[in-house]
Amino acid sequence: QVQLVESGGGLVQPGNSLRLSCAASGFTLSSYYLSWVRQAPGKGLEWLSGISSGDGSTTYADSVKGRFTISRDSAKNTLYLQMNSLKPEDTAVYYCARDLGYLEVWGQGTLVTVSS
């Protein structure tokens, strides 16, 4: 069964860091383009970052470039999103997704709240 399970969300103060994890099962994560997206309260989905299959080249949205880092651990079949210098506007539910140009498979999400 193809599945993605996010974890690592929580309440964090502005300026602090958090690392999200996305455990894949039923497929080899490094064989696909994977993305992180988020949905803030009352807003639509926002694509944040992607990592390509094979060479693992990465791409970021301007809103997170320089603050967020996407990576993967092939041995653990897990995708990560390291988030630094968090801002209140980063508050959202974060999802990882297998991205075929559309979000083919995605997890249940993990809530990140940035607040003092």
Image (cartoon, helix red, strand yellow):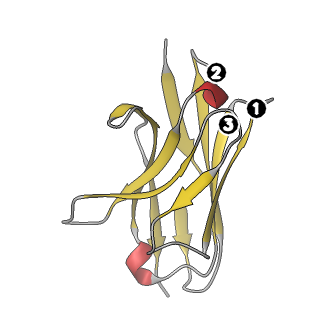
Asked if 86 appears above or below 9 in the picture, the reply is below
Q: Which residue is mark 1?
A: 74
Residue in view at x 22 percent, y 59 percent: 44
Q: Nearer the viewer, residue 96 or 113?
A: 96
Residue in view at x 64 percent, y 75 percent: 84
* Helix, strand or loop for disc 2: loop
User: Dot 2: within a 10 Å radius of its alpha carbon, few (fewer than 14), some, or many (20 or more) residues?
Assistant: some
Residue in view at x 45 percent, y 66 percent: 61
Viewer can see residue 37: yes
Q: Is residue 10 left or right of residue 78?
A: left
Residue at the extreme left: 42
Q: Nearer the viewer, residue 102 or 113?
A: 102
Find residue 13 and report its horizontal and vertical position in percent: 56, 82
Residue 92: which numbered mark, if any?
none
Q: CA distance from mark 1 to mark 2?
A: 8 Å
Find residue 78 and report its horizontal and vertical position in percent: 67, 36
Q: Which residue is mark 2?
A: 28
Q: Are marks 1 and 2 in contact (CB under 8 Å)?
A: yes
User: Dot 1: within a 10 Å radius of its alpha carbon, few (fewer than 14), some, or many (20 or more) residues?
Assistant: few
Viewer can see residue 9: no
Residue 78: which numbered mark, if any?
3
Label 3 amino acid? Thr
Q: CA distance from mark 2 to mark 3?
A: 9 Å
